[in-house]
Image (spheres, rainbow, N blue to C red):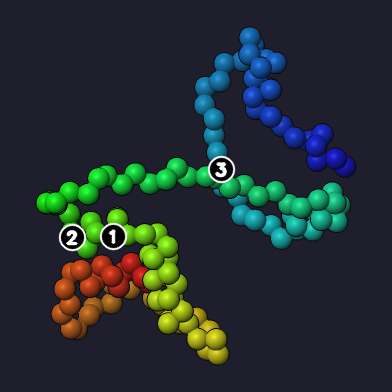
């Protein structure tokens, strides 16, 4: 069994039959990962399983303005923070929630569905949702 012989290339397929075919659409679907795939690739095919990754373009951040309207100030400033600082803050917050002895905390699937007795500002509710 050779995986290289079974590889299908859409571009080559259309080039060979372009005079007879007219592409209308291209459909994608999602599947769940099966644990037997790793076994098949390692033991039967003798190779590593493929990894499909997408390289996203960097996010566009408009030039900073002195006066910002129609946008919360804290979310506006967060756009211009260094990504390393943001990631470090998120990891530190996550590590404060976990315990190596007790495991992960039980977090509600819908944290704002339960009524909150004490009043908190809207920006704080946003922070609660963002980190949970």
Looking at the image, residue 52 sits to the left or right of residue 48; the answer is: left
x and y, in percent, of residue 43 in the image: 85, 56
Question: Is the C-beta separation of discs 2 and 1 under 8 Å?
Answer: no
In the image, farthest residue toward the bottom: 101
Above or below for 116 versus 46 = below
Residue 110 seen in this snapshot: no
Above or below for 68 versus 112 = above
Q: Label 1 neighbourhood size at 10 Å, few (<14), some (14-19), many (20+)? A: few
Q: Secondary structure at mark 2?
A: helix
**Which comes before the other along the chain, label 3 or label 2?**
3
Q: Secondary structure at mark 3?
A: loop
Label 1 or label 3, whichever lies nearer to me, is: 1
Q: Nearer the viewer, residue 73 or 128?
A: 73
Question: Is the C-beta separation of discs 3 and 2 under 8 Å?
Answer: no
x and y, in percent, of residue 103 in the image: 53, 84
Residue 83 seen in this snapshot: yes
**Which comes before the other along the chain, label 1 or label 3?**
3
x and y, in percent, of residue 29 in the image: 56, 43
Residue highlighted by disc 1? 78
Cα separation between marks 3 and 2? 40 Å
Q: Nearer the viewer, residue 14 or 66?
A: 66
Q: Secondary structure at mark 1?
A: helix
Residue highlighted by disc 2? 73
Query: Which numbered tag is attached to residue 125?
Result: none
Count of marks placed on residues:
3
Looking at the image, residue 8 sits to the left or right of residue 73; the answer is: right
Q: Label 2 neighbourhood size at 10 Å, few (<14), some (14-19), many (20+)? A: few
Q: Label 3 neighbourhood size at 10 Å, few (<14), some (14-19), many (20+)? A: few
Above or below for 17 versus 4 = above
């Amino acid at each position: 069994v050779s995986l290289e012989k079974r590889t299908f290339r859409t571009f080559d397929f259309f080039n060979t039959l372009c005079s007879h075919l007219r592409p209308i659409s291209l459909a994608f679907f999602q599947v769940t990962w099966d644990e037997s795939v790793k076994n098949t690739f390692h033991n039967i095919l003798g190779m590593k399983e493929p990894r499909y990754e997408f390289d996203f373009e960097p996010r566009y951040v408009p030039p900073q303005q002195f006066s910002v309207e129609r946008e919360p100030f804290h979310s506006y400033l967060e756009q211009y923070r260094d990504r390393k600082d943001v990631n470090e803050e998120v990891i530190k917050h996550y590590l404060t929630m976990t315990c190596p002895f007790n495991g992960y905390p039980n977090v509600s699937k819908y944290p704002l569905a339960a009524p909150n007795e004490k009043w908190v500002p809207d920006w704080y509710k946003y922070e609660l949702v963002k980190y949970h």
